[in-house]
Amino acid sequence: MATVRRRSLFLCIDFHGRKSYRFSMKAIVSEKGQGTIPKPCRDRLGLRAGTVLDFEAHDGQLVAVKRHTADVFRKWRGRGKLPAGLNVDDYLAKARG
């Protein structure tokens, strides 16, 4: 039985439009040493305001790695369940005696 190769719809559509970033994107470094990460890269990598990046130089290339900052309260979420029928003030009064 002969196999039929199907091209996906994605490959058949021409995405080479005026704002196509398929092959390269560039940013210019300012006099202060600042640069802007292009929006398609930010969206693809989930970079938002306040995201911490670690920069390294490898073989003449600048490599930025997103640092995963741990949420200090994440391990405590959901552990402070109050007994049924008590609000916070009643619970604190009972706990303090």
Image: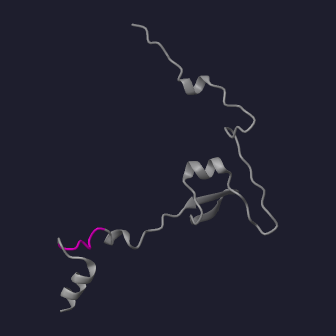
**Vertical side of 20 occupied by 36: above or below:** below
Residue 15 occupies quadrant: top right
Q: Which residue is depicted at the point 32% across and 69% down?
A: 77
User: In terms of image quadrants, where is residue 34?
Assistant: bottom right
The x and y percentages for residue 14 are: 66, 26
Residue 46 percent across, percent down from the top left: 54, 54
Q: Locate the C terminus and report the quarter of the image it occupies.
A: bottom left
From this view, report whether residue 14 is shown above or below residue 47: above
- Identify the residue at image location x=60%, y=22%: 12
Left-right relation of 41 to 17: left
User: Toward which corner of the image does residue 21 lie, by quadrant?
Assistant: top right
Quadrant, the N terminus: top left
- Along the line of sight, the residue nearer the viewer: 80 or 64: 80
Q: Outermost residue, bottom direction? A: 97
Examine the residues drawn in magenta and state their main secondary structure: loop
Q: Is residue 16 magenta?
A: no
Q: How is the image coloured?
A: one colour
Instruction: Tell me: residue 93, above or below residue 40.
Output: below
Q: For this rendering, which residue is in front, 81 or 71?
A: 81
- Position of 27 compared to 67: left or right? right
Write the residue at 56% across / 64% down: 51
Q: In the rendering, at what x and y percent does residue 87 appear?
A: 24, 77
Q: Residue furthest top?
A: 1
Residue 79 belongs to the span the image colors magenta = yes
The percent coordinates of residue 6 (x first, y second) are 50, 17
Magenta range: 78-83
